Amino acid sequence: MRRGKHQDNPPNFDDAFRARLAKLFAWRRDVRRFKSDPVASSLIEELVRAAALAPSVGNSQPWRFVSVETLVAREAVIANFNACNAAALASYEGERAALYARLKLSGLREAPMHLAVFCDHATEAGFGLGRKTMPEALDYSVVAAIHTFWLSARAKNLGVGWVSILDPGELSRTLDVPPAWKLIAYLCVGFPLEEHLDPELERQDWQAHLPENKRLHRR
């Protein structure tokens, strides 16, 4: 058995750090409005390395980040979104439909960086540990990596927007990824045009903040 890396002097996370960490959590917003300023590819690579520090079931590390850079691919993604968004709008009626139509639900046109994040269901890493009873833990591992990426981006003053109004199969064909890769998230990344502490969907009266007593249940 290989010896682990022992740390004689683990970091001390003091009250000042904890306060700043809480502020980072609070300012992690889903961004839809971006500046046109470019984002260095080296910075994205740094954030992906940070994302790879996330926990994963069986240490499988199944996340696969795809940078979507060509105009042809981006236009195809935008067309995908427009079709899915129109279908979603048609599922609502009355005032809710009118409100939905006013929402800005993506920054696909404005964001300088697009990242599609997949879960590699064919990975042999981890040898299946932890996935026999809960195979969905592989997908959850990728979600943890996305959240790590998101917080790391915010700490670099970048904004991230998660676009879920997409047809995953069509997007996978657009990006020509292996069949075993499952789309988990499509991310827009760039410097925010606006800064808000409250979520966009709260400001637009789509969904209010849920009461604290909805979160923790005891048995």
Image (cartoon, rainbow, N blue to C red):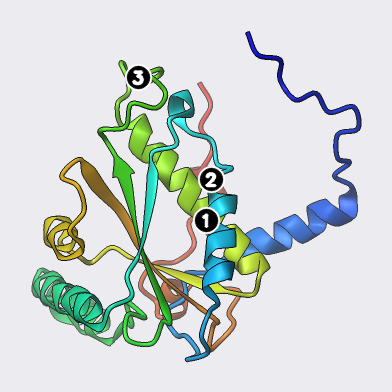
Q: Where's residue 47, x and y in %?
A: 57, 60
Under mark 2, the amino acid is: Ala
SS at badge 2: loop
Secondary structure of the residue carrying tag 3 is loop
Residue found at the far bottom of this picture: 36
Left/right of residue 173 with respect to residue 31 in the rendered view: left
Q: Residue furthest top?
A: 1
- 165 to 57, vertically: above or below: below
Of callouts 1 and 3, the N-terminal one: 1
- Whether residues under marks 1 and 2 lie with C-beta atoms below 8 angstroms apart, the answer is yes
Q: Secondary structure at mark 1?
A: helix
Of the two numbered discs 2 and 3 on the same chain, state the one appearing first in sequence: 2
The CA span between labels 2 and 3 is: 19 Å
Q: Which residue is mark 3?
A: 128
Residue 211 visible in the shown view: no
Determine whether, in the image, residue 4 is placed left or right of residue 203: right
Q: Position of residue 14 (x, y in %)?
A: 89, 47
- For the N terminus, give its image quadrant: top right
Identify the residue at image location x=28%, y=87%: 102
Amino acid tagged 3: Gly
- The amino acid pointed to by label 1 is Val
Mark 3 crowd level (few <14, some 14–19, many ≥20, 10 Å Cα): some
Q: Position of residue 104 (x, y in %)?
A: 33, 83
Name the residue nearer the viewer: 185 or 66: 66
> Is 109 on the left-hand or right-hand side of 77?
right
**Rendered image: mark on residue 52:** 2
Label 1 crowd bin: few (<14), some (14–19), many (20+), radius 10 Å = many
Q: Residue at x 24, y 46 (%)?
A: 182
Please provide percent x and percent y for residue 9: 91, 32
Number of residues whose C-alpha sits closer than 10 Å to that of mark 2, classed few (under 14), some (14–19) or many (20 or more): some
- Quadrant in which residue 125 is drawn: top left
Q: Which mark is residue 48?
A: 1
